[in-house]
Image (tube, rainbow, N blue to C red):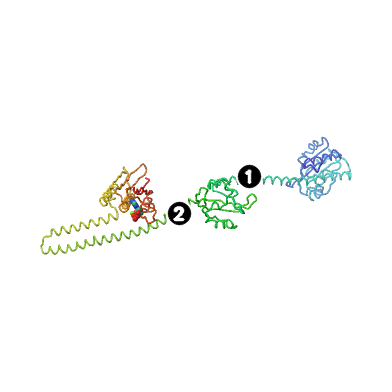
Amino acid sequence: MVHSSLDLKKIFKHITDGVVRYMGFTTAIFFMLDKKRTRFEVKALTTRKGLLTLINTVGGISIKNFSIPAELTLNAAIRSAMNGQTVVVKTLEEIVYPLISKKRCADLQKLGKTKTLIILPLENDGEVIGGVFITSKQEEILEEELEMIKSFSHAASNAIKNADLHQQVKNAYEETRLSQEALHLSESKCSILFESIPDPVFILDKKTRHFLDCNKAALDRYGYTLKELKTKTPYDLHPVEDFAALDEHISNETDFSPHQYTQITKRGERLQVEIHSAPLEYEGEEAWISIIRDITLHKQAEAEIKRSHEELKKLAAHLQTIREEERTLVAYELHDDIGQGLSALKMDLYMLEEKFLKGENLSARFQKTKDLLDNMIQTIRKIYTDLRPTLLEHFSIKEVIEDHVDKFQDLTKIKSECEIDLGETRLEEGFSLALFRIVQEALNNVKWHSQATKVTVKLVKENNHIELKIEDNGIGIKVADLKRPSSFGIIGMRERASLLGGKLDVRAVPNKGTSVLVHFPL
Ligand SMILES: Nc1ncnc2c1ncn2[C@@H]1O[C@H](COP(=O)(O)OP(=O)(O)O)[C@@H](O)[C@H]1O
Ligand SMILES: [Mg+2]
């Protein structure tokens, strides 16, 4: 019975009960080392009827809560017991002094009519872990009785061992249960995490290279159902030209750095992706986990930046060329018109001087010279207004554009209309200049490329933006022309617009015409 029960407290109580009730002892107390191994505490106790209360009151102690320090210094009897010896003494004092005063010891002993006291140590693996304390009214304890008690304490030791073992099993079981619970918890946590990752995640069988699983993001992005996907391999998501690189990536056991690929969805959409992969054990199989980052937009933006960078580079070179061309033009004009004019003036002055000295009539000659000067002044004005429309310093953008459009009509014979209404809005000079340059370039294009018979320039202020539109009825600009990197006129207009926070759009209908639209937020 002792062996089979695993409840130590019950076992101890059986022993103390047995000792008192069936063997005629007066008191039996079971002590055990506490968990911290610093004190022996009472674990079970049985006394003759009524004795307990008496002991408590007379002894001034509570036996149930009585404990003995585990240090070996207390007294000789305890020291012997701690060394594993059975101790038989005649006075209580020998055992509990100095924990209990000598007087109290004597009183207690008298009360229980105690003649003999025994301590039986309780050992586990050669170490004393407790003991049974027994009192008797008899002077002598029989050898058989001692043996009997020893066998009890032996049984108790076994029970303790069993209980330990049981506790270990229980602990191990508890640990397994907890770790299983933790596993379960971490599995469900993992699966929540897996599902909630916004990037597509695939799990791939390393041997067959079939997909084993994927998250919701993957199904959404690639358009397959999980069932469909499980019949596929990564090759089904990649274009043929990527196969070799993909092969190498999958078979590489050491390089886990991200790789960039093109992937194709079920809908045929091409994605630019960055794949981060790592090996993993999945349901006991060697597998790969791949997290897919969609970098399509990123790549597009990158290409866009590269393209506009290229455009700007070309534009800068073009601007440089234009500058040179303009310089050459100015130089020609200075040389041809001003230079020639000044030479002519100089010759006129010599002639006038000659004629003046001869006393001839000079009025006709003076008139010719004045005309020459007028021509030169005109030329100079043309040069500097071409260089910079100074008109804007003195006139509003409305007046300057209207003037320009009028002149354009005179020059090209293309019917040109103007609708300008900015209300009370006064534009900054830089802004006006940009608008004017766009109008100038757009009209130039109309003149050179459109074959139009009519053009309208419209500049109006809407609620919170300014809209500029130059619309012709010509052959319509071709998409290819629009995208040509050498279309500097259009690139220049677009750049000017974007420098002012605006957006330029060119629309065309073949043989119906072209419209250049600029939208500036205010
Ligand atoms: N209004 C228009 N109608 C038809 N074609 C046009 C028009 N404007 C521009 N284009 C076409 O677009 C090309 C690019 O224009 P642009 O960038 O101004 O360059 P450029 O005028 O120096 O040729 C032109 O060469 C022409 O073929
Ligand atoms: Mg042009």
Q: CA distance from mark 1 to mark 2?
A: 45 Å
| Label 2, ligand 1: CB separation under 8 Å | no
Could you tell me which secondary element the residue under label 2 belongs to? helix
Lower sequence index among marks 1 and 2: 1
Task: Look at mark 2 in the image and give the residue it sits on.
Answer: 303
Quarter in which the C terminus is drawn? top left
| Quadrant in which residue 377 is drawn | bottom left
Could you tell me which secondary element the residue under label 1 belongs to? helix
Nearest the viewer among 187 and 451 is: 451
**Residue 495, image x and y in percent?**
37, 52
User: Residue type at mark 2?
Assistant: Ala
Is residue 42 at all visible to an observer of this figure?
no
Is residue 344 shown left or right of residue 112? Answer: left
Nearest the viewer among 381 and 81 is: 381
Q: Residue at x 45, y 54 (%)?
A: 303
Q: Residue at x 57, y 53 (%)?
A: 277
Which residue extends farthest top?
50
User: Residue type at mark 1?
Assistant: Leu
| Quadrant in which residue 383 is drawn | bottom left
Q: Residue at x 18, y 63 (%)?
A: 347
Where 310 falls versus 146 (above or below)? below
- The total number of labels drawn is 2
**Residue 317, image x and y in percent?**
37, 59
Task: Look at mark 1 in the image and give the residue it sits on.
Answer: 185
**Residue 335, image x and y in percent?**
25, 62
Graded by Cα atoms within 10 Å as few (under 14), some (14 to 19) or many (20 or more), the crowding at tag 2 reads: few
Quarter in which the N terminus is drawn? top right
Is residue 366 shown left or right of residue 285? Answer: left
Q: Are marks 1 and 2 in contact (CB under 8 Å)?
A: no
Nearer the observer, disc 1 or disc 2? 2
